[in-house]
Image (tube, helix red, strand yellow):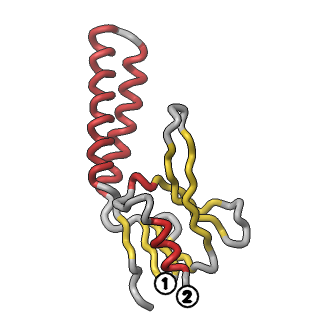
């Protein structure tokens, strides 16, 4: 069995941007808690702390998060899947600000409403426009 042709790791620039944002929200929350005695500060500390914790987990994750090849695909949460077992779709969702977020969604081929895994394309070190081409290329036999 040949190795996977494409391997995608977490994007280091995405990790850094999220770390800066999480640390900023955490700092603002601490300032609000100590100087203003506002309850919003506690909320900011919780949100910022959660954001920093997620960044730390992504930063410590070694190895690829998504592998694509002729034999199928592999993710951390699902393991190896053959192309006959799963469907890969790129889905876009609109945020409240009107921005679009792209997700890679893995679904069971027989029961397409059952989702196996979902993660943001922005979190991976791949161009969101080229990912569908890589998927289609590997799905061909």
Instruction: Tell me the quarter of the image containing the N terminus.
Output: bottom left
Is the residue 129 above or below the residue 122 in the image? below
Q: Residue at x 27, y 9 (%)?
A: 35
**Marks 2 and 1 close (CB-CB < 8 Å):** yes
Residue 44 percent location from the top left of the image: 38, 24
Mark yes or no: residue 117 visible. Answer: no
Marking on residue 70: 1
Mark yes or no: residue 93 visible. Answer: yes
- Specify whether 43 is left or right of 141: left
Which residue is situated farthest in the bottom direction here? 1
Residue 102 percent location from the top left of the image: 50, 52
For the residue pair 44 and 136, the one nearer the viewer reads as 136
Q: Residue at x 40, y 29 (%)?
A: 46
Marking on residue 42: none
N-terminal of the two: label 2 or label 1? 1
Residue 72 percent location from the top left of the image: 52, 79
Residue corresponding to mark 2: 141
Instruction: Tell me the quarter of the image containing the C terminus.
Output: bottom right
The residues bearing labels 2 and 1 have C-alpha atoms spaced at a distance of: 7 Å
Q: Residue 140's image quarter?
A: bottom right
Residue 45 percent location from the top left of the image: 36, 26
């Amino acid at each position: 069995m040949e190795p996977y042709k494409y391997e995608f790791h977490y994007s280091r620039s995405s990790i850094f941007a999220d770390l800066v944002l999480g640390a900023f929200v955490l700092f603002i929350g601490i300032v609000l808690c100590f100087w203003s005695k506002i309850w919003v500060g506690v909320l900011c500390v919780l949100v910022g702390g959660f954001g920093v914790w997620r960044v730390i987990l992504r930063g410590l994750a070694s190895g690829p998060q998504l592998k694509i090849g002729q034999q199928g695909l592999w993710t951390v949460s699902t393991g190896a899947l053959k192309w006959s077992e799963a469907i890969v779709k790129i889905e876009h969702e609109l945020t409240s600000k009107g921005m679009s977020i792209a997700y890679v969604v893995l679904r069971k081929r027989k029961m397409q409403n059952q989702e196996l895994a979902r993660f943001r394309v922005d979190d991976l070190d791949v161009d969101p426009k080229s990912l569908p081409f890589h998927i289609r290329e590997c799905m061909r036999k």
